[in-house]
Image (spheres, grey):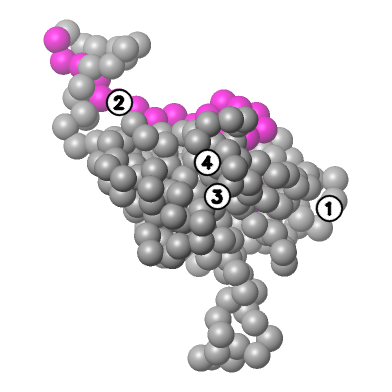
């Protein structure tokens, strides 16, 4: 599933993040341009391998962020980690003992989340311009945290009640159930999670162009 937190940032924090992103984008040395064709499983072979996807985007890695980056401050904020723990750790597992956890006496310590130590991909910026997209794919992590800091451009003739944004949709297909199954996603086109009974048929239908199972933010 997903949890959509509206107005998650204060206006001043959002403004700082937007300003930082724009400044980094202006310097081409900070930007890695990625264009690739891939399968939905992000690896060769397997089911759905015939449904080739195309992804185009610009990335700014963590090591390009300045030392006093507001994005880094947010990423390493312990309060954010604790909030995500409450969201992504299933109910009933808060006190479950897991391999490698420290315990005090017979009372297991609760599962904890910590920021990634990856110096490049711990936290990074994705930028999508006209014609860019993130193709459908199965996510490899047990959860992900996306912070959308800029709305997509609007159609020239949209007006207050016009056609609306040009792309930039954040969508997914959800089936619920077995959380061991991988989610599938896409950004300017869509973003989805599918699992449990019939998730494969839902994925296949979506890859063939069906909108029946598509939800969005």
Q: Which residue is mark 2?
A: 111
Write the start and end of the magenta stretch as one range: 106-126
Instruction: Report the front residue among 169 and 146.
Output: 169
Residues at badges 4 and 1 in contact (C-beta under 8 Å)? Answer: no
Which of the 4 image quarters holds residue 117? Answer: top right
Label 1 sits on a secondary structure element that is loop
Secondary structure of residue under mark 2 = loop
Q: CA distance from mark 1 to mark 2?
A: 40 Å
Q: Which mark is residue 69?
A: none
Q: Which residue appears farthest toward the top when viewing the image?
A: 105
Q: Residues within 10 Å of mark 1 (few under 14, many from 20)?
A: few
Q: Is residue 120 magenta?
A: yes
Q: Residues within 10 Å of mark 2 (few under 14, many from 20)?
A: some
Question: Which label's residue is closer to the chain start, 4 or 1?
Answer: 1
Is residue 3 positioned above or below 47 on the image?
Answer: below
Contact between marks 1 and 2 (CB within 8 A): the answer is no
Q: Secondary structure at mark 3?
A: loop
Position in image of residue 208 (x %, y %): 51, 56
Q: How much space separates mark 3 and mark 2, taking CA atoms?
A: 31 Å
Rendered view: 161 above or below 36: below
Which numbered dot is residue 27? Answer: 1
User: Are circles 1 and 3 on residues that touch, CB within 8 Å?
Assistant: no
- Could you tell which of marks 1 and 3 lies nearer the N-terminus? 1
The structure residue drawn at horizontal position 74% and vertical position 40%, both measured from the top left corner, is 64
**Cα distance between the residues tagged 3 and 4:** 11 Å
Q: Residue at x 69, y 40 (%)?
A: 61
Q: Magenta-highlighted stretch: main secondary structure?
A: loop
Sequence-first disc among 4 and 2: 4
Which is in the foreground here, disc 1 or disc 3?
A: 3
Specify whether 63 is left or right of 50: right
Nearer to me, 92 or 80: 92
Separation of marks 1 and 3 at Cα, in angstroms: 29 Å
């Amino acid at each position: 599933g997903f949890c959509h937190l509206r107005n998650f940032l204060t206006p001043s924090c959002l403004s700082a993040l937007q300003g930082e992103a724009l400044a980094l984008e202006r310097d081409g040395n900070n930007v890695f341009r990625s264009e690739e064709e891939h399968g939905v499983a992000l690896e060769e072979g397997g089911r759905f391998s015939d449904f080739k996807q195309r992804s185009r985007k610009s990335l700014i890695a963590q090591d390009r962020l300045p030392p006093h980056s507001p994005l880094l401050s947010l990423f390493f904020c312990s309060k954010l980690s604790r909030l995500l723990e409450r969201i992504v750790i299933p109910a009933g597992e808060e006190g479950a003992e897991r391999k490698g956890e420290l315990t005090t006496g017979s009372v297991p310590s609760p599962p904890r989340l910590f920021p990634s130590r990856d110096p490049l991909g711990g936290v990074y910026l994705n930028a999508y311009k006209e014609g860019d997209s993130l193709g459908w794919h199965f996510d490899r992590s047990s959860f992900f945290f996306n912070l959308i800091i800029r709305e997509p451009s609007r159609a020239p003739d949209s007006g207050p009640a016009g056609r609306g944004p040009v792309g930039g949709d954040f969508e997914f297909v959800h089936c619920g159930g077995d959380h061991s199954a991988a989610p599938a996603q896409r950004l300017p086109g869509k973003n989805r999670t599918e699992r449990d009974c019939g998730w494969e048929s839902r994925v296949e239908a979506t890859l063939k162009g069906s909108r029946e199972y598509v939800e969005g933010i």
